[in-house]
Image (tube, helix red, strand yellow):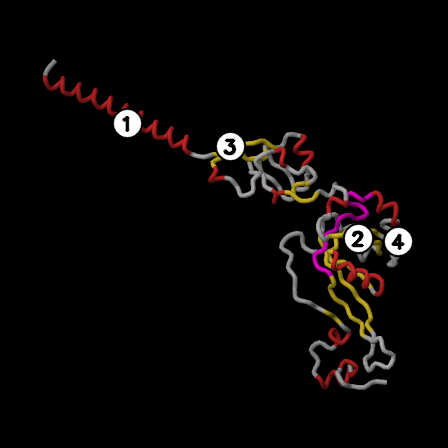
Amino acid sequence: MSYSVRNIVIALILAVVAAGLVIMYTSNVQHNADKSIKTTTVVVSKGDIVAGTPLNTLVDGGAFTTRQVATKDVVPGAYTSIKSLNTSLATATNLTAGAQVTPAMFSDSKDTAIVNQIHGTMRAVQMSFNANRVLGGTLKAGDHVDILGETTIQASANNSKYTQETVAGRIITNVEVLSTYDTGVATEPLTSASGANSASGTDDGTGGDAVILAVPQNLLPDLMLVRANGEFWMALRPSHGAQDTGISLATPCSIFGAGMTLAQLKNALPICVSGVKHS
């Protein structure tokens, strides 16, 4: 073997050895790095799950599993054990396969007893109205409504200078519907007790379509007063992104006198002009 050939062979051998050492070093560094990454056990969905599915059904059907993920990638609040899931709830949103499961993904199930759907200062109230007043056939358990009231206000003193006034306005905002005559856990009792879907439903609570609402305790007197002494209506809120305007109160004068000048009011609606005496 010539001197030059020998040098080439030695160089090649050294290059191979060096490459091997680099590979071994890199692998060792990567192995140590992998060992240093902290992981956490989280609960994930095995497949896609639609909103409204009872959690007890999902757990019994094995819809969830646990997985180790890097601690830095754990979603805030993610469950770490399937046993910690509250099986009285239902999915509030659609879940995608592999998604980490968090409490925000669940809400009260509409198949749960009414008493277990209310918490804290919320109270369940059942009433029956003409279908038009409660959006019969449209309103479903889980919807949210605004409650509107209309009544006539008059002075308590017989010799008061103020005349009676008819007013209408929103009295309670964003009330959850727990059950209706055709949806929710109380469907059967409501149907049999209220003559549900009756076209001749009354407004005194003895007929019509019944609903059960979750009303804050401090607003129950408001609801009772308007219900007993005036008219009562429900307005369905959007399921997502609902917004509210400021306080609004309507009177005959605010409706029919809107945009009129003082002179026009005095001419057409003198009763709406403050200070004007009437017989």
**Residue 181 in magenta stretch:** yes
Q: Which residue is mark 2?
A: 125
Residue 102 position (above or below residue 273)? above
The boundaries of the magenta stretch are 172-187
Q: Which mark is residue 207?
A: 4
Label whose residue precedes the other's in the sequence (4 or 3)? 3
Viewer-side residue, 60 vs 123: 123
Where disc 1 sits, the SS reads: helix
Residue that appears at 51% across and 39% down? 74
Give the SS element for disc 4. loop
Residue 47 in picture, x, y percent from top left: 60, 34
* Circles 2, 1 touching at the beta carbon (< 8 Å): no
Q: Identify the mark at residue 68; answer none if there is no mark.
A: 3
Q: CA distance from mark 4 to mark 3?
A: 57 Å
Mark 2 or mark 3: which comes first in sequence? Answer: 3
Q: Residues within 10 Å of mark 1 (few under 14, many from 20)?
A: few
Q: Residue furthest left?
A: 3
Quadrant in which the C terminus is drawn: bottom right
**Mark 3 or 1, nearer chain start:** 1
Badge number at residue 22: 1
Q: Which is more N-terminal, label 2 or label 4?
A: 2
- Indicate the amino acid at tag 3: Gln
The amino acid type, in three-letter code, at marker 1 is Val
